[in-house]
Amino acid sequence: MTLQELDSIGFLLGSTYRRVSNLFAAKLKEYDITPEQWGVLYYICAQEGMNQKELAAHAYKDQPTTARILDVLHRKGLIRKEIDPHDRRAFLVYPNEDGRALMQKVHALEAQHNQEIAELITPEHMEQLSQLLHELRSRLEEA
């Protein structure tokens, strides 16, 4: 690997994401949930009754990955699935009581984690970073 490859935007974004995610994963360990599972559960709680395709789009994951995460969340007793009355081949996903309770606990932990990460750079840089990443993601979605 060359030094130029280490400075590529993809490498920088990926390695930064992994470090931030690994720190969050360590904090989530006691709750027996991964950052990926938490992200999907977050969207399930935020907008109950989405189908797998909608969840995948919101969580920026492919459908097979989303299906695996949903299976894990279902086995852990955090969500329930109901047949979609408009499409008998699909199902709608809802959090159950345990899923909502876990989301409440972990949402506070995630907010604290975000604050700790934000404190590593100036508020101005954090605002710029957020704006730039949103713009980049938006343009990539358009492409």
Image (spheres, rainbow, N blue to C red):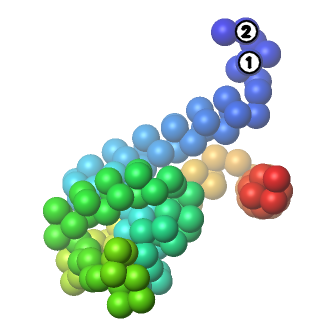
Q: Say whether residue 110 is left or right of residue 5.
A: left
The quadrant where residue 38 appears: bottom left
**Which residue corresponds to mark 2?**
2
> Residue, x 44% and y 62% (percent of image)?
39
| Residue 15 visible somewhere in the drawing | yes
Q: Which element type, helix, strand or loop, lies under badge 2?
A: loop
**Which residue corresponds to mark 1?**
5
> Residue, x 66% and y 9% (percent of image)?
1
Callouts 1 and 2 close, C-beta under 8 Å:
yes
Q: State the separation of the CA atoms marked 1 and 2.
A: 5 Å
Q: Position of residue 109 (x, y in %)?
A: 40, 64
Q: How many other residues sit within 10 Å of disc 2, few (<14), some (14-19) or many (≥20)?
A: few
Q: Position of residue 115 (x, y in %)?
A: 56, 60
Residue type at mark 1: give it.
Glu
Residue type at mark 2: give it.
Thr
As drawn, the label of residue 130 is none
